[in-house]
Image (cartoon, rainbow, N blue to C red):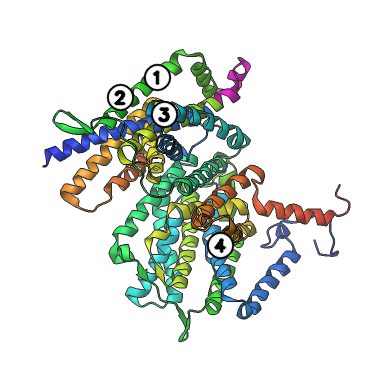
Amino acid sequence: MNYELLGNLLVNGAIVGTLYGVVAMCFVLIYKSTQVVNFAQGEFLLIGAWVCWALLVKFGLPFWIGFPITLLFMFFFGVLLQLVVLRPMIGEPIISVIMLTIGLSIFFQASMSWIFGVFVKPFPQIFETESVSILGLQVQTAYVMSMIISVIIMVGFYYFFKHSRAGLAMRATAFDQQVAQSLGISVQKAFALSWAISAMVSALAGVVVGMVNGVSSALSFFGIKVFPAVILGGLDSIVGAIAGGLIIGLLENFAEFLDSQYFHVGNMYTVAPFYILVIILMIKPYGLFGTKDIERI
Amino acid sequence: MSGHSMMRCGEFRTDYKSDTTIFPTPRSRYAAIAGVLFLLVAAPFLNPYYLNLLIQIGYYGIAALGLNILVGFTGQISLGHAAFFGFGAFASAWINNTTGIPVFLAIPLAGLMTTAVGLIFGIPAGRIKGLYLAIATLASQFILEDFFARAEWFTGGTYGSMANPVSLFGYELDTEQSFFYVVLFWTVLMFVLAANLLRTRDGRAFIAVRDHYLSAEIMGINLTKYRILSFGISSFYAGIGGALFAHYLGFVSAEGFTILLSIQFLGMIIIGGLGSVMGTLLGTAFMVLLPEVMEGIVSNLQWLGSGVSEALVYIKEMAIGLAIILFLIFEPDGLAHRWQMIKSYWKLYPFSY
């Protein structure tokens, strides 16, 4: 047993897991409030990271200006996407909605590769020190920051949905659109807002990942890794998304550890979550925290 | 009902027999037969470029038809069709290379092998549906892709595997002209089989499951059986399509069967029309021709700078994504529906009301 490697991988897993959790939370936010399965979630990370990269590198803005502009851009991007592309799809069958977001996903992925190229571009150095030592393990500063930011986002989500007016309106819309509408809540606004928040927070996650690994189209794979996380947690549960993200992050690193120590088959990191996904779907399709559908004729 | 008049103002069926024909009207039957005959005669005169496109439409069309049986007729979603297509391609090459079974027999055998795999991956479909199923099939795509990279005995690993051309009575059908007949044979066979399937008890069960699965179950349709069966049939089609693909190119490598191809298959049936056999062919033709058209446009835009032609691969991908989005927003019923509207317009012309 190589305990140091195991420890490293598990810390890594916990950190990546919280990022999965954040992205999964954004995914669930859209699913819960607008009943749209967003296969383009990973592209939100990608676009956010590229926009921030362009602002910092091409325009030479400092991080504390470039980053808020990125978030603002993503907010409006989310609203625009909802208004232009997703509003016509309300009431369409689920296959159409899924295909629409898949179409968006390949469109954005290809356009980003066209604009920014396929090679990994490093983010400019933002922190003075590359890595800090936690419990004797070297952890990248950006990861520590990502952990802190993730926790702040999660707490922020909690307050937003429990106490703010807009958040309560969105929860009401998610619960029952007709009732919400008759209480004077603008369902359209709630829909647009959920896409905006989701795009913004995903972009934040994208920037964090970009800082560590550099920006490339590999970022959009986060959007696919999110599925095992949300299925594990339950599709319509925000708490479940966070838990699912963490578990998937830890599990894939644990699988990587087992692979490197015993099996030597390779590529476990990518595939293990999907095996887990299939097993969950066979045993407990509604996940850990999801609500079970009861259907009537 | 008989075809007294050539110009009728609609398709009026008066008995079940006429409602369950393979072709909706006698004229559409004649048109289809004439089309196939035309292709049979014309093939030796077409240049290899057009034949290549027609062959692509053929094998992708077969696979897309399988997906349409699953998505359009049974109402399930599969994001892993390319993996089954790839499995068929590898399976056919493997059967031919290891056992020496001739290629024209290896193709249907590969179809059956893919069916078996499809049935295994279809098992979750017995329990889950809709979005959950979409994600489960997404998982099967990644698991099979991983398997292709890993199983060297089967796929040749990263090197890929060679596939021999189809040979019949000692003749090698390795030119565009000769292989075109093979693809045409399989395409006609598979499309007629699919059209026929939908007239049978099983085909009607599929449609009942799609339209309202709870009602269907209450009427005595075994949901689990038909959902998994639909996966099996769809994989069979994918396997046949993939096998033809393999023996046409002569070489199979795992890189070709990614999620993007799965999405393209879904794009074909959405653009063509969900639940339409003829629409599948139209959609496939659209999806195969779209990159060629984009290439034509880009080659006319050279004056914009050299960057345009380098971006061609991205422009093609963007066009696929955009085509799917625009069709879903503006023509969700696909080309088949558009064709129906054109037909009914001329049927009633000039008195459209």
Label 4 crowd (10 A; few <14 / some 14-19 / many >=20): many
Chain containing the residue with disc 3:
A
Tell whether position A185 is magenta.
yes
Query: Looking at the image, is mark 1 or mark 2 nearer the viewer?
Result: 2
One can see residue B265 in this view: no
Task: Determine the CA span between mark 2 and mark 4.
Answer: 51 Å
Position of A2 with respect to A184 (left or right) is left
Residue farthest to the right, as pictured: B351
Regarding mark 1 in the picture, which secondary structure is present there? helix
Label 2 in the same subunit as label 4: no
Measure how far apart labels 1 and 3 are at the Cα level. Answer: 18 Å
Q: Quadrant of residue B18?
A: bottom right
Going from the N terminus, do you reach mark 2 or mark 3 first?
A: 3
Return the chain for callout 4.
B
Circle 2 — which element? helix
* B32 falls in the magenta region: no
Query: Mark 3 falls on what kind of element?
Result: helix
Quadrant location of the N terminus of chain B? bottom right
The answer as to whether the residues below labels 1 and 3 share one chain is yes
Name the residue carrying label 2: A148
Horizontal relation, residue B93 to residue B212: left or right = left
Which residue position holds label 4?
B61
As drawn, the label of residue A67 is 3
The extreme bottom residue here reads B170
Residue B351 pos. (x, y %): 88, 51
In the image, what residue type sits under mark 1? Answer: Gly
In magenta, the rendered stretch is: A177-191
Looking at the rendered structure, the kind of residue marked 2 is Ile
CA gap, disc 2 and disc 3: 16 Å
Circle 1 packing at 10 Å, graded few (<14), some (14-19), many (20+), is few
Residue at figure coordinates x 61%, y 35% from the top left: A84
